[in-house]
Image: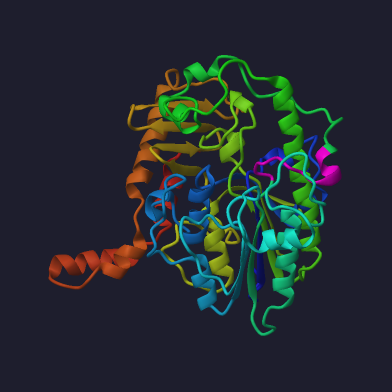
Amino acid sequence: MATRRPNILLVMTDSSRRDTLSCYGSAHAVSPNLDRLAAEGVRFEQAHTTAPVFTPARAALLTGTHTPVHGCVENGISRRPDLITLPELLGGAGYHTIMVGKTHFGGPAAFDVECVLGGEKGATVEDDYARHLAEHGYARASAHPNPIPPDLFCDAYLVDRTIEAIMNRPADRPYFAFCSLPSPHSPLDPPGEWAGLFDDVELPPLNHQPGEETCRPAHLEALVGRRGVESEQQDGPLDLTAVDAQRRLYYGLAAYCDAQIGRLLDHVDPDNTLVVFTTDHGQQYFDHGFNDKHTFYDESWRIPLIMRWPGAIAPGTVADWAMTTDLTATFAAVAGVDAPTLQGSNLLDPAVRRTCAASVLHRSLALATDGWKLEYYPEDGTGRLFDRRNDPREQHDCWSDRLGVRQQLLEALLSWRADLTDVQYLQEHTHQGGPVAQRVAAQTARRTGLDAELRLSARVPV
């Protein structure tokens, strides 16, 4: 690993599936800039978001902890305010911290420079982006068809502000810049020629079998809006014409994001900047019959992750497992910060490697290994099990058929969940006292946030 402290540029989109990038094997994606980034760095094949929904995932990035620790287990729930945050860690190490775009961290976070988007890109709010558009005669809210020119639209505006902040940074300090783009999240409003980019492109068929929703757990169906008083998903057969139109706009919007990211990459020092691209989560876009996230299907839980740092990362590398919290730990490590309470590992350290991914979302848990994926819903005492090698489209539930595998994975998952601990709180609030207290204090001092992750990797089957 290189010994110098690099600048750090994190580019995050919202709701980017892996099939929006050609470097992940998509035959229809238009992603030349991110493909180039992958060719110059490392692409993670088994990257998973810490939680497949935006606020819990972004709170995990900010705090480097899993949802039960930071407290935001679903959208609409604030995170705990006492956990140390990524800009605090890096700022304390002398980094100039920059935040541009969508936050949704579940609470405030202090950066040296902030250009924050108010609400979603289609919202009618008053912010710097709204004033920018008003100067050119356009309204802030957008939809399809989008009248705003590509060079004025939201993602281009945020890239411009990121470039500006990097160029105006203090010359004597390394920087951490977080460029958080709201696309390709809905509204599906690609501007200009990007709206028709996929009009004549053959898209793959949906990953969907009619009637499969009748076999899904009740908690999953409720989370994605298909059951209960908050039901918002379409009932009955899919309108395939409407679905096709939405998918084409989605991939066009993702391609537009790639073009804007390419402009940003052209303005960073390639030799002294750790560049990371990822997303907060994916999206179903009617694979498995509905359009949402809040689910552990690969389309939503498994995400793209690319890193480039010449001298520290060999070009064209393909790695395996990573999670959102690993980014927090990696940034702290390259900045020279000792942060033992983080629940992630330094992705640049070959001595520490995950062999799986685990997640908690609301009242559900999941574990993915090389060969299997287990979902568990404690309230109902039920779950699902998928054979990832022989059923990569996740269409055949093995919960009732592979009892031995189910038991082994379930024990590993529940042990991990019980093992998750707020190590920062323990270290800050453990005091010396009598013999028992002294023994507890000694044990607490040895604990790290990574302990539960390492024990989980040791428990799962090879």
Residue 391 showing in the rendered view: no
Residue 201 showing in the rendered view: yes
Q: Nearer the viewer, residue 231 or 138?
A: 138
- For the record, the magenta segment spans 184-195
**Quarter of the image with the N terminus in it:** bottom right
Residue drawn where x is 53% and y is 42% of the image? 52
Say if the magenta span includes residue 190.
yes
Residue drawn where x is 41% and y is 49% of the image? 77
Q: Quadrant of residue 99?
A: bottom right
Residue drawn where x is 60% and y is 23% of the image? 289
Say if the magenta span includes residue 310.
no
On screen, residue 161 above or below 319: below
Q: Nearer the viewer, residue 399 or 86?
A: 86
Left or right for 117, reference 74:
right
Q: Position of residue 346 (x, y in %)?
A: 55, 61
On screen, residue 191 above or below 346: above
Q: Position of residue 203 (x, y in %)?
A: 78, 28
Magenta portion: prevailing SS class: loop
